Amino acid sequence: MSAKTKIVVLHMKELVYTVIFVVLAVLLILLFVFMFGSKKDESAKETMKYTPGKYTSSILFNDNSIDVEVVVDENRINSVSLVNLDESVATMYPLMQPALDAISQQIYENQSLEGIDYGSENQYTSQVLVEAIRNALSKAEEK
């Protein structure tokens, strides 16, 4: 076993280039991790995304069709209204418009159908209206 001493000559220029490339590679890796890494905090805050436009869903009351129209932009519900509301239907179901007004106010504030409070006097009407709004919003959701 002979112990031969080996001398390694490092050129300063090559050493500096190597250090610079290693630092750039680490920065590039960190950039990719931050850009494409999981964003759990932002996904929880993210609201539903919609295709902008007007969407309708029909409700059938005694052979009369009433359309619930929902107008949305990219990430907001802008309006909820009843369309094709015949006077005879409005007379037969007088709680429909006040129930929709109460529901739509809550939807505008929360931008969601979750946690909507129904009044006890128009609970079933409100449930039918919320289901129609949910159907219209499902048409608007981006896939």
Image (cartoon, rainbow, N blue to C red):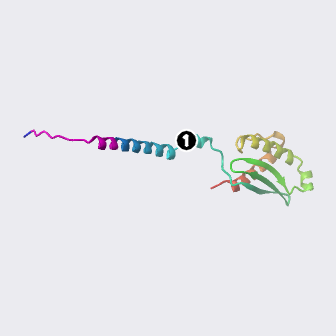
**Viewer-closest of 84 and 47:** 47
Identify which residue is drawn at 60% across, 41% down: 44
- In this rendering, would 15 be left or right of 59? left
Identify which residue is drawn at 55% across, 41% down: 40
**Viewer-closest of 20 and 132:** 20
Assess disc 1: are there few (<14), some (14-19) or many (≥20) residues with their C-alpha within 10 Å of its C-alpha: few
Image quadrant for the C terminus?
bottom right
Which residue, given by chain and number where applicable, does mark 1 sit on? Answer: 40
**Quadrant of residue 117 in the image?**
top right
**Position in image of residue 21 (x %, y %):** 37, 44
> As drawn, which residue projects farthest toward the bottom?
63
Image quadrant for the N terminus?
top left
Identify which residue is drawn at 13% across, 39% down: 5
Asked if the stretch drawn in magenta spans residue 10, the answer is yes
**Quadrant of residue 105 in the image?**
top right
* Element marked by disc 1: helix
**Position in image of residue 127 (x %, y %):** 77, 47
Identify which residue is drawn at 50% across, 43% down: 34
Amino acid carrying mark 1 in the image: Lys
**Magenta residues, start to end:** 3-18
**Viewer-closest of 62 and 114:** 114
**Position in image of residue 66 (x %, y %):** 83, 56
**Position in image of residue 27 (x %, y %):** 43, 42
